[in-house]
Image: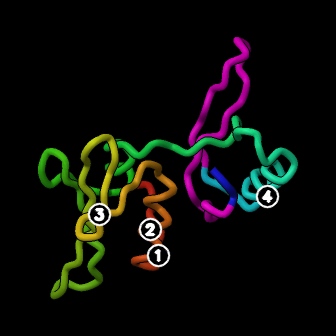
Amino acid sequence: MTANELRLGNWINVGGNSINTYQTYKPRQITANGIKAIEEENEERPDAVLSIWQPIELTEEWLLKFGFKTHDKHDYFIDISDSSVFHFWFSVYSGDGFYYIDAFDIKLKYVHQLQNLYFALTGMELTINT
């Protein structure tokens, strides 16, 4: 993962060493300082794998957190209409371990990829429903 893949507000896993010296990860929203730290780590050690900053794998749980609803067993949609007359659904379906955007056949593996594509197509941020 590189800094240019991320936007402010993207969700990523940030790791830290636990007492047992293995990485423990917690989902966090990326900040400007986070992007800068990723950029600096890439510049200083471009061949190193970023162990602290990891993408979050896209799962049904994340789709539901963002407000997607289940249509069929492997289909999810979110209604992004701003009127009661015209309805536009942002639709995602799963297959072969990946998620795809319906009609475009764009493969998504990580939460930040879905967030970025959703923003590019709608101009709106995906937010977690609480």
In the image, which disc is placed on residue 105? 3
> Counting residues from the N terminus, which is met first, the one under dot 1 or under dot 4?
4
Q: Secondary structure at mark 1?
A: helix
Quarter occupied by residue 55: top right
Q: Amino acid at mark 4?
A: Lys
> Counting residues from the N terminus, which is met first, the one under dot 4 or under dot 3?
4
Q: Please determine whether, in this image, residue 110 is positioned above or below residue 21.
A: below
Q: Secondary structure at mark 3?
A: loop
Q: Secondary structure at mark 4?
A: helix
Residue at position x 19%, y 79% in the image: 87
Mark 4, other Cα within 10 Å: few <14 / some 14–19 / many ≥20:
few
Q: Position of residue 119 (x, y in %)?
A: 47, 72
Residue farthest left in this picture:
72
Q: CA distance from mark 1 to mark 2?
A: 5 Å
According to the image, label 1 marks what residue?
A: 120
4 vs 3, front mark: 3
Residue at position x 74%, y 53% in the image: 34
Residue at position x 41%, y 46% in the image: 58
Q: Is 19 a magenta residue?
A: yes
> Counting residues from the N terminus, which is met first, the one under dot 2 or under dot 4?
4
Specify whether 11 is left or right of 61.
right
In the image, which disc is placed on residue 117? 2
Q: Nearer the viewer, residue 27 or 39?
A: 39
Q: Amino acid at mark 1?
A: Ala
Q: Nearer the viewer, residue 35 or 98?
A: 98
According to the image, label 4 marks what residue?
A: 36
Q: Is residue 130 visible?
A: no
Q: Secondary structure at mark 2?
A: helix
Q: What's drawn in magenta, residue-wise?
A: 4-28
Q: Position of residue 98 (x, y in %)?
A: 34, 47
